[in-house]
Amino acid sequence: MARLASPPFIALDSVLLAAALFHGPNGVRVVATDLGLGGARLRILSWALLVLGMAGLAYGTYALMSFL
């Protein structure tokens, strides 16, 4: 359990969280583009996914900080 509280472990977990929260919503956006979504709808979806991703990153980082 002490390893979970070490700053390098928290930093690597934060990077993994950021990568996952970039990869997932970007995949949703690419699928929407492949299905023919474009223009203003794609722009709205992209912004919505960005906001959700940033909220998830903030929540996940907050959860990780509880180990420190």
Image (cartoon, rainbow, N blue to C red):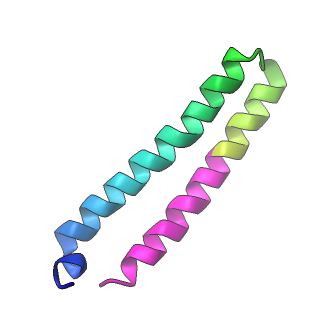
Q: How many marks?
A: 0
Which of the 4 quarters of the picture holds residue 10?
bottom left
Q: Residue at x 66, y 44 (%)?
A: 49
Q: Split into 4 quadrants, where in the image is the C terminus?
A: bottom left
Which of the 4 quarters of the picture holds residue 11?
bottom left
Which of the 4 quarters of the picture holds residue 1?
bottom left
Q: Residue at x 39, y 84 (%)?
A: 66
Task: From the image, give the main secondary structure of the stretch colored magenta.
Answer: helix
User: Where's residue 19, x and y in %?
Assistant: 40, 46
In this picture, is 54 found above or below 8? above
Judge from the rendering whether residue 42 lies leftward or rightward of residue 13; answer left or right.
right
Who is closer to the viewer here, 62 or 20? 20
User: Where's residue 48, x and y in %?
Assistant: 72, 45
Q: Residue at x 53, y 41 (%)?
A: 24
Q: Is residue 58 magenta?
A: yes
In this picture, is 36 found above or below 28? above
Q: Residue at x 39, y 74 (%)?
A: 64
User: Where's residue 36, x and y in %?
Assistant: 77, 14
Which segment is the magenta one? Answer: 50-68
In this picture, is 43 found above or below 38? below
Q: Is residue 65 magenta?
A: yes
In this picture, is 2 found above or below 35? below
| Outermost front residue | 1
User: Where's residue 40, x and y in %?
Assistant: 83, 25
Judge from the rendering whether residue 30 lies leftward or rightward of residue 3; answer left or right.
right
Judge from the rendering whether residue 44 lies leftward or rightward of residue 58; answer left or right.
right
